[in-house]
Amino acid sequence: MTIAFPRAMPLYGVGVQRFELQRVDFLSPRTDGRLNGITAGFPLWSATWTLTAMSPDRRQEWRAWVASLRGPQRQFYGTDLTASLPLAYRATGLGAFGGDAASWSINTDRDVLTLTGLPSGFKLSPGDYVGFRWGTTKRAIVRVLEAGTGATISFSVEPALPSVVPGSAIAHVKDAACLMRLTPETEIGEIGVDGILSGKIAAIQDLIP
């Protein structure tokens, strides 16, 4: 069977992770003593996942998964493994709700998102994610910055929604992910006599239209 790319990540065997925005920012001092901030390029999601104890078959799967990506040559779907669902639903699940909003809209600055068609009384919390999918394989993700409740919710997000996300994209609150590629910091290490596989998976978002 042929492996299809982008690939999903294995969802087990990670001890700790980091999933945060990587920004290239500069300070621009003014003659009056004030400081202005300048951003060079669009912020990208950067992640590391550190491996821990797991069964032999799962160790083998991680090693094969990393090998299949050929370093940064092939894409995968990167995700915050601690937040596949909004905080309010991580213990109970979403029930009959599949996670897709009926529609969405964005303000002019693309940093205030409105979702409609959610279940009555639906809750979003700061730190939750909204994903966008379009085409066959394209994905993007934003982080919720403020709480909201209702069938229609408007809230600030970071980063601003990339302009490559088309209006026809589907917004969803379950299993939000973005396209990523491995970076050279990725390393599969030694296997201890206790069976623990050392290693770190490092990646950066590949933001493409």
Image (tube, rainbow, N blue to C red):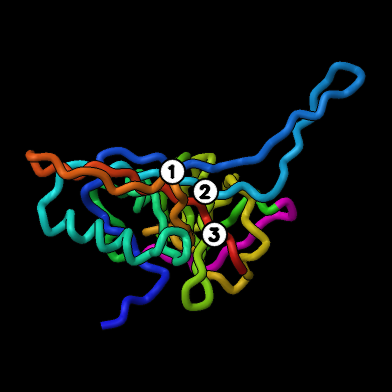
Is tag 2's residue or tag 1's residue first in the polypeptide sequence?
1
Near mark 2 (Cα within 10 A), the count class, few <14, some 14-19 or many ≥20, is many
Q: Closer to the N terminus: mark 3 or mark 2? A: 2
Q: Upstream in the sequence, badge 1 or badge 3?
A: 1
Q: CA distance from mark 1 to mark 3?
A: 14 Å
Q: Which mark is residue 206?
A: 3
Front residue (pair 80, 93)? 80
Residue ID for mark 1: 19
- Residue picked out by circle 2: 45
Residue 108 in the image: x percent, y percent? 74, 55
Q: Secondary structure under badge 2?
A: strand
Q: Is residue 1 visible?
A: yes
Q: Residues within 10 Å of mark 1 (few under 14, many from 20)?
A: some
Judged by its main secondary structure, the magenta piece is loop
Which residue is pictured at 18% across the width and 54% down the height?
A: 59
Going by the numbered disc 2, the residue's amino acid type is: Trp
Q: Which residues are magenta?
A: 99-109
The residue positioned 42% from the left and 44% from the top of the image is: 185
Residue situated furthest bottom in the rendering: 1
> What residue appears at the point 29 percent right and 48 percent down from the top-left corner?
188
